[in-house]
Amino acid sequence: MFDAVAERYDLLNDVLSLGQDRRWRSVVARLVAAGPCDTVLDIAGGTGTSARGFTASGARCVACDFSLGMLQVGASRTAARRTAGADQPIGAGGHTADGHARVPGAARFVAGDALELPFANEAFQVVTISFGLRNVTDPDAALAEMLRVTRPGGRLVICEFSHLPVRRVDAVYQRYLAAALPAVAARLSPNPGAYAYLAESIRGWPGQDELAGRIRAAGWSAVRWRNLTFGVVAVHVGRRPR
């Protein structure tokens, strides 16, 4: 399903969220707070949209995804940016003439399953996943696997669709998603059925408090969360105990 929408995935996210997805990802990047010496694992990293925000400071990032189609699109776009940047002079602040950042920490793309990550224990300072945890067949096992590959004291950042605080308003919002997402996607996507799935998966996803409890149950500490766009999206953070 994700292979089929890979080429237009980022465009559709921008259209369907009315541009809010850029704000959500910028919040995630601030919470990840990756430094030049940090290694970041971006699970469900797709085309590398989030990873580019993490590497802006020079951090090393691995974008790991189950969809080879998404990874291929991301890798080809990264290669094109590198080629374009190599042909331009570097100005102040390490930017090329057209404003693109020229940093040493470009993302790597790795195929992998969130339930069996192909990485060693304690390999990353930060592990993050945006809009992907609800697509995993066993989210609790994925949370435990994320803990395994995070260093003691390391950080977890999860950005995921959530539920509006007022139940009746949330019910109206869910009906809107079920009708609007496939209708808009039918005009822009080669696979509008994927966006019917999107609405269904959001409706069945746990609320903010329940998800925080499941993160704690997986072994994470200092778990907290904040709503974005009135609760359309929630960002949960935690730490691996030292």
Image (cartoon, rainbow, N blue to C red):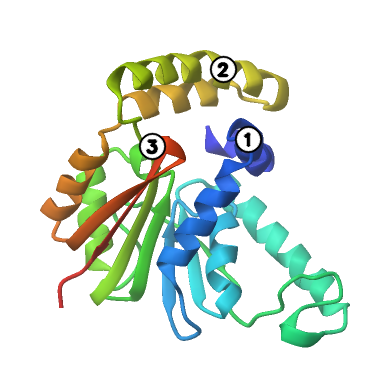
Report the residue marked by disc 3.
231
Whole-Å distance between the Cαs marked 2 and 1?
A: 13 Å
> Can residue 46 be seen here?
no
Whole-Å distance between the Cαs marked 3 and 1?
A: 15 Å
- Going from N to C along the chain, the mark reached first, 3 or 1, is 1
What amino acid is labelled 3 in the image?
Gly
Tell which tag, 3 or 2, sits nearer the viewer: 3
Residue 60 location (% of width, % of height): 50, 77
Q: Please report the residue visible at 42 percent of the width from the left and 67 percent of the height from the top.
A: 32
Query: Quick one: label 1, few (<14), some, or many (20+) residues within 10 Å?
Result: few
Whole-Å distance between the Cαs marked 3 and 2?
A: 18 Å
Report the residue marked by disc 1.
18
> Can residue 69 be seen here?
yes
Toward the viewer: 86 or 93?
Answer: 93
Circle 1 — which element? loop
Image disc number at residue 180: 2
Q: How many marks?
A: 3
Instruction: Pick the quarter of the image with the C terminus.
Output: bottom left
Query: Quick one: label 2, few (<14), some, or many (20+) residues within 10 Å?
Result: some
Tell which tag, 2 or 1, sits nearer the viewer: 1
- Going from N to C along the chain, the mark reached first, 2 or 1, is 1
Residue 51 location (% of width, % of height): 54, 63
Residue 62 location (% of width, % of height): 48, 67
What amino acid is labelled 2 in the image?
Ala
Describe residue 239's horizontal placement relative to residue 23 as left or right.
Answer: left
Q: Please report the residue visible at 75 percent of the width from the left and 72 percent of the height from the top.
A: 82
Compared to residue 77, the image places residue 177 above or below, namely above
Q: Please report the residue visible at 23 percent of the width from the left and 64 percent of the height from the top.
A: 147
Q: Please report the residue visible at 64 percent of the width from the left and 35 percent of the height from the top.
A: 12
